[in-house]
Structures are given as C-alpha cells and as structure tokens.
Amino acid sequence: MIEITNFRNNHLIDPHLEIWEWPIAVYLFLGGLVAGLMILNGVWRLMNKQTDAPASTRMAPLWAPVLLSLGMFFLWIDLSYKTHVYRFYMTFQIASPMSWGAWILILVYPAQLLAIGIATEIKSFKGPFRFLNLPIAFLQAAAFGKEKLIAWLNITMGAGLGIYTGILLAAFAARPLWNTALLGPLFLISGLSTAAAWNLLSKPAHDEEKTLVRWDLALIAIELMLITVFLIGLATGPQGHQDAGELLLGGSFTATFWVFVVIVGLLLPFWLELREVTGRFAPKWAAPVFVLVGGLALRLIMVYAGQVSHIPDVEMLSGGF
Amino acid sequence: MARYGMVIDTKRCVGCHSCVISCFLENEVPEGYTRDWIVEVVSGKSPDFRMELRSERCNHCDDPPCVFVCPCGASYKEEGTGIVLVHKDKCSGCKACLAACPYNARFINPKGYADKCTFCDHRVKAGLKPGCASTCPTKAINFGDFDEPGSELHRLMEGRVVKTLKPDAGTKPQIYFLL
Amino acid sequence: MSNHFNRRQFIKIAGMGSAAAGLAASGMNPWGWPANALAGSLGSDVQVIPTFCELCFWKCGINAKVRDGKIIKLEGHPKHPLSNGRLCPRGNGGTGLTYDPDRLKKPLMRVQKRGEDVFREVSWEDALDFTAEKMLDIKAKHTADCLALFNHGYGATFIKTLLMAYGTHSIAAPSYAQCRGPREVGFELTFGEEVLSPERTDIKNSRMLVLIGSHLGENMHNTQVQEFADAMANGAKLVVVDPRHSVAAGKADWYLPIKPGTDIALLLAWMNVLISEELYDKEYVEQHTYGFEQLKQHVKSYTPEKVWKITGIRPALIRATAREMGHQKPAVLIHPGRHVTWYGDDTQRSRAIAILNALVGSWGRKGGFFYPGELDVPMPELPKFPPMTKKRADLQLKDYPLAFSTLASGLCDATFPAPQAECQLKGWFVYGTNLFFSLPKPEQTREALQHLEFVAVSDVLPMEIVGWADVVLPDATYLERYDDLHVGHYRDPFIALRQPVIEPLYDTRPPWWVSKELAKRLDVADYFPWDNIEDYLQQRLTPMGIKLSDLKKDGVKVFPRQALYFEDGVQPEFYTDSGKIELYSAKLASYGHDPIPVFTDHGDPPEGYFRLLFGRAPVHTFGRTTNNRVLNRVIDTNHVWINRRIAEQWGIKNGQMIRLQNQDGAITNEIAAKVTERIRHDCVYMTHGFGHKAKGLTNKKGASDSDLITRYNTDPIMGGTGMNVNFVTFVV
Ligand SMILES: Nc1nc2c(c(=O)[nH]1)N[C@H]1C(S)=C(S)[C@@H](COP(=O)(O)OP(=O)(O)OC[C@H]3O[C@@H](n4cnc5c(=O)[nH]c(N)nc54)[C@H](O)[C@@H]3O)O[C@H]1N2
Ligand SMILES: Nc1nc2c(c(=O)[nH]1)N[C@H]1C(S)=C(S)[C@@H](COP(=O)(O)OP(=O)(O)OC[C@H]3O[C@@H](n4cnc5c(=O)[nH]c(N)nc54)[C@H](O)[C@@H]3O)O[C@H]1N2
Ligand code: SF4
Ligand code: SF4
Ligand code: SF4
Ligand code: SF4
Ligand code: SF4
Ligand SMILES: [Mo]
C-alpha cells in the first residue's frame, strides 16, 4: 500500500491548479480565430480572388481587430492585478512565450489595420460609423500598392499568432497535457477552421462559400489527424503524459472532450460539409456553428485539463518502495 | 558567488509543521496560503511500513521554468545567491509562473503578485538562517551554500541516499532530501 | 553597488547580522538588494523580548519580536535549555492565542441558571468582591477545605498560594490522576524518585530507545523531540510499541503493533528473555536492586510464546528486541511515557517499565535516566498556611496512601453528597483547566457543577467550563503578564523569567494581581508581602545574585552543570524502603497490591465495537489551542483512524463524515474518517481536543474523545483514571 498525505492547502493550487479559467480559454479561442481570419484573407488575396470573397476579405478584416481586442480583454480579466497590465510592455523576455505573445498581440494590429486599408471594396460608412471613414481613408492611402506585401504580412503574423496560442501552453513542461510540440499546429489548424466557419457565417459569396467548405473539410481532417497523434503521443509518453492522456481517454474530461470537441466540433461538421460538397442537403449555418463550438470547447478542455495534469512524484510512479 | 540550497533530512523530520507556522509569521504569508508544506508518504505492509516525511517548498531550481516563462522579467534568479525571487514591482499577476512550476510552489498573493518561498533572503542577507530552518526542532532543515568548499551541506549528504523532487522535470532543484 | 558579492564579503556581512538589518531598516541599502528585501521579523524597529512559552507545560524559552506594539513573531530562545533556539509548532503559533478575537475580554457574572452560559460584564472590583464574599461564605459555613482549586499551567502559582492561604488543601491538576501520576508513583516505588517534568530521560545519548505508546513527534514536547531526532541521527535503535503506526513508529527499527492494553505482558516477556538469556546488567542488578530472585521466578512463565498469544507480537520479534536491549545496555531507555492513565493498572505498567530499565541498568546512566541539575531558589518567607480541617476531599471515598498529589477526578467525586464524606465540596475555583475536556465522564462533571454553591473560573477563552461559572476572571495571556520565576531542573539548572511582551489587550488581569487583590479581600494579604510583581521577583532573585533588569534582557540564567550519571559522580542512592531499586515492592504488598506487576486482561471490544484510543496532534495542545487561528491554518479538525479492512466492511470511505457512539450511547459530532492500514483492526484513534461546543468559540470542528469517555478504570494504587477502556461503534 501507499498512503500519501499532503498537508498543503493553497487556494487555487490544491488539490490541483485552477489558476486559469474560461477567460483564458476564450482568449485562446479568439486569438486562434483572428489568426485564421488573417491568414485566410491573405491567402484569398495571394490567389487574387479578393473580389470573389467578400466575407473573408472585406468583413473579416473589420472583425479581426475587434475580436482580438475582445480576446485581450479576456486576458486582462484574468490578471490578478489589472492595473499592472502595462508591466508586460516594460520589457521583452526572449525566453517567455507569453512575452512574445504580448508583443505579437500588439504587432498584429498594424498588419490588421493595413489589411483594412487594402480591403478596397469597403465603401464609405453611413450613420453612426461615419467617423471611421477618415481613418479608413488614411489606411487605404497607406496601403495603396502594397497589397501583396500586406497579404504576406497577414499570413505570417496570423500564423505567428495562431501557433503562439498553442505554444503558450506547450511551453509548460510542468503540465504534460500541454507539453507537446503538436499543440502549436493543432491550435493553428483549429484556428483556421474556426476562421473558415466564421467567414461562412458572414454572408460569403457563392464561390467563396464552396471553397471555404472544401478548405474546412481539409482542415478538419488534418485536425482529426493531429488529435489522434496527440493522443497517441500522450498514451505512449512518460507517466505524466499517460496520466494526462487518461484525462481525455478515460477520466474526468473524457465525455466532454469526445462529445464537444470530437463529435460536435469535428465529426458532425465534417459530415455536414461532406453532404454539402456532394450536393446533399445540409443546413448552412450548422457546420460553422459546430466548428466554432468545437474550437471553443477544445480550448476550454485544454486549459482546464492541462491544469490537472502534472508530473507525478517519484513515489507515485513506482507505487511504493 | 554562492549557490544557496537546503539539505532536508527526512529521517529527522517528524512532520510537526513548526517550519510551516514559523514561515507564516516570518513572511506574513496571507491566510489560505503557505510557502512550505509537509508531505507524508507511508508505504509497505504492517508492521513493515516505511515512512518518509518531507518539508517541501520552492526548490530554487537551477533551471527554473518559472523564471523562463515570466513575461515581465519579474521572476528572477538572483545573481550571486541562486535564490529564485519575484520582483513585486514588476509582476503583472499573469500566473504563468504558477503554471510553469512543476512543484506548485507558487501562489498569487492577494496583494496581486506571485509569491513563494524566498529562502528568507532578508534573513540570509542579515546573516541568519531562514525562518523554517532556524525553528525546526529536529534540525531536519539545513540551509547553506553548496559552493562553499567543505560545506556542511555536502558533509550531510555523504553516505546517505539523496533525492530531489521530480528530477524528470529537468529543473535541477537546489533542495535535496536525505532518505 | 552591484548585486554581486563573494563568499568573503558574505561572511563579513553575516558577522554584522544585526547591523545589516538595522541599516536596511533605516533605508540604507549598501549591497543593492531590492529595497524591500530586508523585512520580515528583522529591522531596528523590532524589539526582542525574552520570556517563556505557555502553549503547553514544557516552558520553552522564547524571544518575542514586537513591532509597533504588536507581536509579529515568536522564536526559540537560543540560550534556554528547553528550547535551544527552536520552538515546536504550537510555540511558534502562540500569537494566535493572544490575538484570538474570541478571547475573554472583561470580567463576567452569571445572570441565568448555571451552565446556560449567559453573563453580564462587570468591573474587576465587583467580580473580586463577589468572589471573596462567596469564598468567605463557604469558609464560614463549611470550612475552607470544602472549596477546591482545579488548576493547570504556570499562571496558577500565585492562585495556589492564595487558596492555600485561604485554607484549602483540595488543590489538584488534571496532569496527575489523568496524566502522569501512575508513572511517578511507579518510578518512586522502584527507584525512590520520580521521572519529573521535563522528563529526566537522556534520549539524545541513548543507544536504544523503546517507546511504549509515547508518540514523540506528535507529542511535541520540544526538547524531547529535539533529542529524539539527535538519537535517530546518531544511529540509536528504536523500538515502538503502539497499536497505531505513529510518526515515531515510522522511524522505528522494530515496530510492534501491540494489542491495546497488553503492554505489561510484553514487558514481562522482555524481562523473561533478558533474565533467561542472562543479558541483563548483572553487576548493576547485583549492586543496586532488591528482589531479583522473586522477579526471576515471577517472569519465568511469561515466555515470548505465551505472550505472543496475548499481545499479538511474534516471539521472534520479542526475542530480537530483548536481545538488542541486552546488547546496547546500559544506554537503553525504555521511555516511561507521560500520559499513562490508560487501563487502570497503569502504576503497575509503569513499575514494569521501571523494572525493565533497572535490568538494563539505565537509571543513573548515560543514555538512560540522568540526575537533573539542582538549584535552590528559596521562596520568600511566608506565614504558615492554615492546617487541614477535614480529610482531603479526594480521599473521602477511598484512600490512596501511595498517591502523593491530589486527584482532580477525586475532587469531582467529592462534590456529590455521600454519607461517609466528611466534607462535600461546595465551591470550585478553576484556573486554566477545561474540566469538560480534561476529566473523564463529562456528564458527571456537569452534574457536580450543579451541586455547588459557587464556581469561579479563570481562563483566557470562553471554553466549556467558563459557561458554568458564576464569575469569570479573564486572564491575561502568557505574553501579557509576569508570572513567578521558573526554576528549571533539566540537565543544566536554570532560572527563567516570564514577562509581558505587550500590554494586556483587554480588561484582563494577570494572576499575580488577581491573587493579591483577592488576598486583601480574604484577609490573607500577609501572604503577598510585596507591592508589585517586580519587587517580588527581585526579592527572589537577590539571593541568587541576579538583577531583575538583567534577567529581563536575558530571559534565562543557566547555572553550571552538575554530575548527571553514576559514572560521572552521582552517588547511587535510592530513597526506597530497602534503599535499593525495588524490583520487588514490599510496600505494594503491604497495601495489598501485587509486589511485582502482573498482566491482567482488559478484554476485547464487543462485536461491532472498537477500543477508543486518543493522543496528540503536533500542532495542538489538548483542547486549548483548537481555536487558535494561526495553528488552525495547518490543522483545524481531527480524524478518526479506522483500519482499512474494517472501513471496507462498514463501507466507510476515506474522508467520509461519520459519528462515533460508545457502549453507553454517548455520541459525538461529525468527524472525518481516515481510512488507513496504520492502525490495528480492534481499535480506532483520534486526536484529543477537537469537537468544542462552547458557544463563544469559533472553531467547533471535529469530535471530542472526552464525550466518549463515560467509563474509566480507577488505578487501585494511586487513583488514576484509566480512560482507554471505552468502546465505540460507527454511526454512518
Ligand atoms: N503536540 C502536543 N504535544 C503534547 C501535548 C499536546 O497536547 N500536544 N501534551 C503533552 C502532555 S501533557 C502529555 S501527557 C503528553 C502525552 O503524550 P504521550 O505520553 O506520548 O502519549 P499518550 O497520549 O499517552 O499516548 C498516545 C499514543 O499511545 C498509543 N496507545 C494507546 N493505547 C495503547 C496501548 O494500550 N499500548 C500502547 N503501547 N500504546 C497505546 C496511541 O496509539 C498513541 O499513539 O504529550 C505532551 N505533548
Ligand atoms: N479525554 C481526554 N482527557 C484528557 C486527556 C486526553 O488525551 N483525552 N489528556 C489528559 C492529560 S495528559 C492532561 S495533561 C490534561 C490536560 O488538561 P488541561 O490542561 O485542563 O487541558 P485543556 O482542556 O486544554 O484546558 C486548558 C484550559 O486552560 C485555558 N488556558 C490556556 N492558557 C491559559 C492561561 O494563560 N490562563 C488561564 N487562566 N487559562 C488558560 C484554556 O483556554 C483551557 O480552557 O487532560 C487530561 N485529560
Ligand atoms: S519543523 Fe522540522 S521536523 Fe517539523 S515538519 Fe518542519 S522539517 Fe519536519
Ligand atoms: S520550485 Fe517552482 S517556483 Fe521554485 S524555482 Fe523551481 S520552478 Fe520556480
Ligand atoms: S505572475 Fe508575475 S512573476 Fe509570475 S510569470 Fe506572471 S509576471 Fe512573472
Ligand atoms: S525559507 Fe523562509 S520563505 Fe522559504 S519556506 Fe522557509 S521560512 Fe518560508
Ligand atoms: S513544547 Fe512547544 S508549546 Fe510547549 S512550551 Fe515548548 S514551544 Fe511551547
Ligand atoms: Mo499530560
């Protein structure tokens, strides 16, 4: 037998870490979504199809800074001492993914604004948003003639942002569930998928819609693959990783993970989109909504389950001496 | 240059919590939190049990992930002592260091910054032992400088089975437990 | 200034320790540390005031650190022989008592029926007048011997003087008949001397330590635990005999999970092996003991095989441990225990322990029992105390000629009307003992209280007993008051001072003041012939050549060590009838008791019941600290230890809240189960002191073992109350 008594009781730490809650997950979700929106916009432009894709190239650039700011708001909500947020920007810590992230968040804004500048299709605003016309005119002037460059900028910054949302967690060796190189790609792909879904909900043009659905099918397929590899990696890793895998494969997070992430977030939209591509009936709103739900669920579960996972003590490994 | 650390004798320790309570008072640890704690592990079968009692705290890791992840440069390993500390005035309370510590040694002080064992650096710099080490009735907690030639810490480890916590976390703890 | 420093600089800095702290506090920061680095308990604004601890009765020296009139920390006094600079957890958490918001803050007088815990605040003047009036009334109507003083703790010294001056002889503490009385009687009968407190056990020099129940490490008497760790580090062999795998057992070379109540059999079997294999200290036994032949005959039948059946300890284990004793003698300490009132034959068990120690020759030897340092600090001349007018109250119903202290339980018994009693107690003065937690049969205590004409209680917290008072005298805590000098007799004799480190927080008064004030009103002011406590203390210190002002700075004065052992010059003298160590006690025989201990069976629990055992948590002292907010940050409740197999049979899960009910139907509050393999299947265990019910206390968590002690076995030799005789079952 082995009886372990830990007499510690630190608020939000014991019996397991609970320092980050849903705002962080929402922030990661929005970060991934924005990253995806930026990349998709760039890709359409590089394909020179911007005029055929109004949702991805005209609406999305307007949403991106709003969603990103919302994400940062959630990040800020989670800070223990709100007025100290400026301290992120008093320094740059090269070894700290979070410091990179803080700066990336700032640096993507110019790229996003320039993207607004090249969204030439944007007509003048009327009504309450009239005040935006002047700055947009400025942006348009600034961006004029640099469309390709700005497209590339959005793709690279978007990829940076998307991968970063995964790396942020992956950098924590102390939390085996997070501590895998797959988390960056997984969050990036998932971000792209949620971005495609977002655009699908923003009145896309007919061809745009067909393309987005195809892309999303591919993205979901890749995501499924990444998740499989991720789970195999956990199950075959050291004890801490096995325990972490156990959380998703036969533990407290298993049901939510399979239902919301895998079934609702991936398999169901995959099936619906497959029907759509093959010309069978599928409600147009359904797949994108499920993808967004799945994307949020993935981050929520990763944030919460990750904090439960830990490197076990040696004595637990050996099960007694 | 010094490299401070502890050698804690699990054979001497009786799990009394004197170390924990003295730390509360020395460091005004806020209620609901603790910087050090006791872990009791009993294994085996009656009557041949084996018991290990450990007084645990921040390990002042040589490779401290809590420092690497800190986005604000608030967590740092002090030059000249190797003590891992937090600059209250730089901390944003982002909690990255809490997530990064494999030992869950940190917490957020309700005053808004990451808090943890400081090795009582204020005492050490005044030539005193840390609070916990100085009150421990069994002298289980030994504090000193690993870099000091002929250090008492090395002598204590001679001929004993020694371990650090979660060595596979790769943090190189500076607290050694004598079994 | 740079952040770097080298080793040499550091040593220099270290040498200037206090200077460094001072500099930093004054805002200078010569080494470039962050400005907030030097804080905590250091700084020139911190005053260090020595005194001694009262979180238990060990009296360790402390240095109290005070900043802006607030005690910020307590540290071990480095020169005090009982603390050696270190404190146990309770000592560290002492501020939690002084700053307990639940404290008694003003004198109180009862306004409703006794026990209903309803009071009004009164002035000290009124409270003292009332107390004196009632006491004089009892004296006039029934004589002073009909008023009893229950007391515990160092604050009681002046109160005892007062009550003796008033004329009573019924003065008792629960630390005798409920604690170490049987041990002292057993050792006195054997060696002619007591073990005393602090115990004269030379633990740190032991080569082999045998703990019978004594759960050092949970029982946190500071110096003993310090020495226990030293002994372990020096490679001493350890045997722990306990039905529960205690912390000490976790360090043992041999752990003997004995069936509760069968220790005498084991002790006799050890003697059997030592004698039959001729492993005992022959020279010592021959020179110093009386009755060896009788003992030899007596233990012949207690073979390890026979005792195995009684105790459950395998013969090989009994032999191996006995042989190790023979091998390590004389530095073998069979620890006498402290709280030994277990089964009613406790004096005999203590005798058996004493005899075993004699066989290995450990009394008066290094690593065994030392001779404590002597120091005579004369008491100031006082008038003679009034003589006894009636038979001592606790001996009314049954005489215990071998008991040399008053029995607290006996005083409680003497409060009930009894035809043969010369005096039924009419008044109780209770200082620093919560009788509902310290005496067995709390129901009987409750009834007794209803028989009384007058009850005064001095306490610091609104404990259960306070609710039963007619008048409540709120005491200043040990950090707020002077008490009498502590003349300590450990290896080195010493004098220690208790002095206030802060002013009393509330309208509370120290016991010296209360005693002196009451003395005036009781017309016995002659017994307090000094104006204030400092004069008194200086009076006592003057013959010792000590200035009070110096002692206030130093806290303790240690006197030169004298010989500790026979081998370094103590004359082997034994104040027994035979002048020898009495393996055979003719005295016991003459009073009709067994001259050599005999094993008696204490029976098994009835079906579905388990023997209730209890002990200490390292962080708490009895029920007196379980409201302490500092200590409660670590442990604020107790658990009942249940054997895993039994718990499975009952379907009880670890952490599940259950209740315990004893053989008489007494039932506890809810308590969490600790399901463990670390306890035998025939008993359960809990720490004493939790499960408060008094309305003024904040922490009422856990269950009280006292509630379940509705029966006890009386020790026929000295009247101790063996309390490990209750059986409980689970209410799930
Ligand atoms: N932290 C702390 N320390 C204290 C105190 C405190 O309140 N708190 N109180 C002090 C005082 S006044 C005293 S008297 C001492 C008491 O402390 P001790 O004298 O050391 O111990 P007890 O309370 O008698 O015994 C408790 C142990 O005896 C075991 N036991 C019970 N029945 C039997 C039996 O039949 N046979 C054997 N062999 N073992 C048995 C129990 O399982 C338990 O481990 O502690 C002192 N130290
Ligand atoms: N059921 C059961 N009964 C036991 C024991 C057990 O383990 N279980 N143990 C026995 C033993 S070993 C002993 S030594 C006794 C101990 O018995 P007690 O010493 O009576 O122990 P407590 O019940 O803690 O009561 C102490 C009281 O003193 C008060 N007090 C504390 N400090 C001060 C002060 O400075 N001044 C005043 N005036 N009051 C103060 C506390 O508030 C509390 O009400 O109990 C014995 N009885
Ligand atoms: S004070 Fe010492 S003996 Fe007590 S728990 Fe801490 S390390 Fe162990
Ligand atoms: S124990 Fe944790 S907090 Fe301390 S240095 Fe190591 S990683 Fe950092
Ligand atoms: S909580 Fe403070 S110390 Fe910890 S990582 Fe964030 S900024 Fe750094
Ligand atoms: S070194 Fe100081 S801060 Fe660290 S656990 Fe010990 S007392 Fe607490
Ligand atoms: S043993 Fe602990 S509680 Fe008792 S006097 Fe010493 S420090 Fe105080
Ligand atoms: Mo006691």
Image (spheres, rainbow, N blue to C red):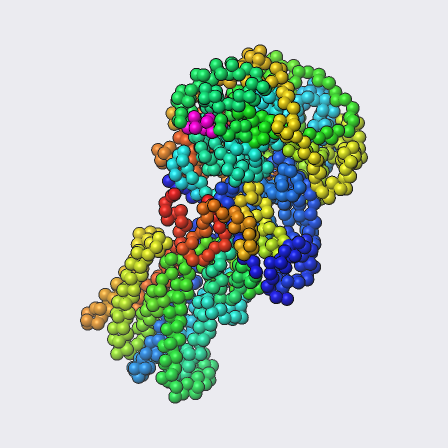
Residue C271 in view here: yes
Above or below: residue C456 compared with residue C415: below
C320 magenta-colored = yes
In the foreground, C463 or C210:
C210
**Quadrant where the N terminus of chain C lies?**
bottom right
Assign the magenta stretch its main secondary structure. helix
Q: How many marks?
A: 0
Residue B63 percent across, percent down from the top left? 47, 60
In the foreground, A259 or A5:
A5
Above or below: residue B122 compared with residue A183: above
Q: Residue at x 62, y 17 (%)?
A: C579
Q: Please indicate whether residue C390 sits to the left or right of residue A290 in the image.
A: right
Q: Please indicate whether residue A63 sits to the left or right of residue A7 in the image.
A: left
Q: Which residues are magenta?
A: C317-325
Q: Quadrant of residue C36?
A: bottom right
Q: Please indicate whether residue A174 sits to the left or right of residue C395 in the image.
A: left
Q: Please indicate whether residue C90 sits to the left or right of residue C24 in the image.
A: left
Q: Quadrant of residue C611?
A: top left
Q: Residue at x 39, y 82 (%)?
A: A150
Residue B36 in view here: no
Residue C205 percent across, percent down from the top left? 56, 34
Q: Residue at x 60, y 21 (%)?
A: C191
Q: Residue at x 42, y 35 (%)?
A: C678
Residue C588 percent across, percent down from the top left? 57, 14
C659 magenta-colored = no
Residue B133 percent across, percent down from the top left? 57, 48
Above or below: residue A11 compared with residue C621: below
**Quadrant where the C terminus of chain C lies?**
top left
